[in-house]
Image (spheres, helix red, strand yellow):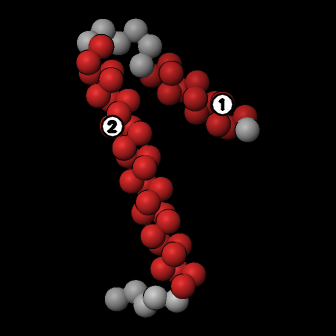
Amino acid sequence: MGTLLHFKTLYTEAFKNCKPEILVVILKIYSVFCAGMLLMALYAFFHRAFTGFEFY
């Protein structure tokens, strides 16, 4: 659990004192989007690996 709190601290510190507020919002949305895409890719990989689909 300490690792997640550390990542949260890094995430909030990264956007601290950033002046163009619209840029901060866009970067936060983009980071959530990238995390979602990474989770979908990991899910697809493990689904294919555990269900026995062949990799070509």
Within 10 Å of disc 1 (Cα), the crowding (few <14, some 14-19, many 20+) is few
The crowding category of the residue bearing disc 2, from other C-alpha atoms within 10 Å (few below 14, some 14 to 19, many at least 20), is: few
Q: Amino acid at mark 1?
A: Leu
Whether 32 is drawn above or below 22: the answer is below
Q: Nearer the viewer, residue 9 or 35?
A: 35
Q: Secondary structure at mark 2?
A: helix
In the picture provided, is 19 more to the left or to the right than 48?
A: left
Label 1: which residue? 5
- In the rendered image, which quarter contains the C terminus? bottom left
Count of all numbered marks drawn on residues in the image: 2
Q: Is residue 36 above or below residue 10?
A: below
| Residue depicted at 30% across the width and 13% down the height | 21
Please tell me whether residue 53 is drawn above or below residue 22 in the rendered image: below
Residue 38 rendering spot, x and y as whole percentages: 43, 55
Q: Residue at x 51, y 75 (%)?
A: 47
Residue at the image position 40 percent from the left and 9 percent from the top: 17
Where is residue 52? Give x, y as percent.
52, 89
The residue type indicated by label 2 comes to Tyr
Q: Quadrant of residue 26?
A: top left
Disc number for residue 27: none
Q: Earlier in the sequence, mark 1 or mark 2?
A: 1
Using the image, tell me which numbered label, if any, was put on residue 30.
2
Q: Secondary structure at mark 1?
A: helix
Q: Identify the residue shown where x is 66% and y is 30%.
A: 5
Q: CA distance from mark 1 to mark 2?
A: 20 Å
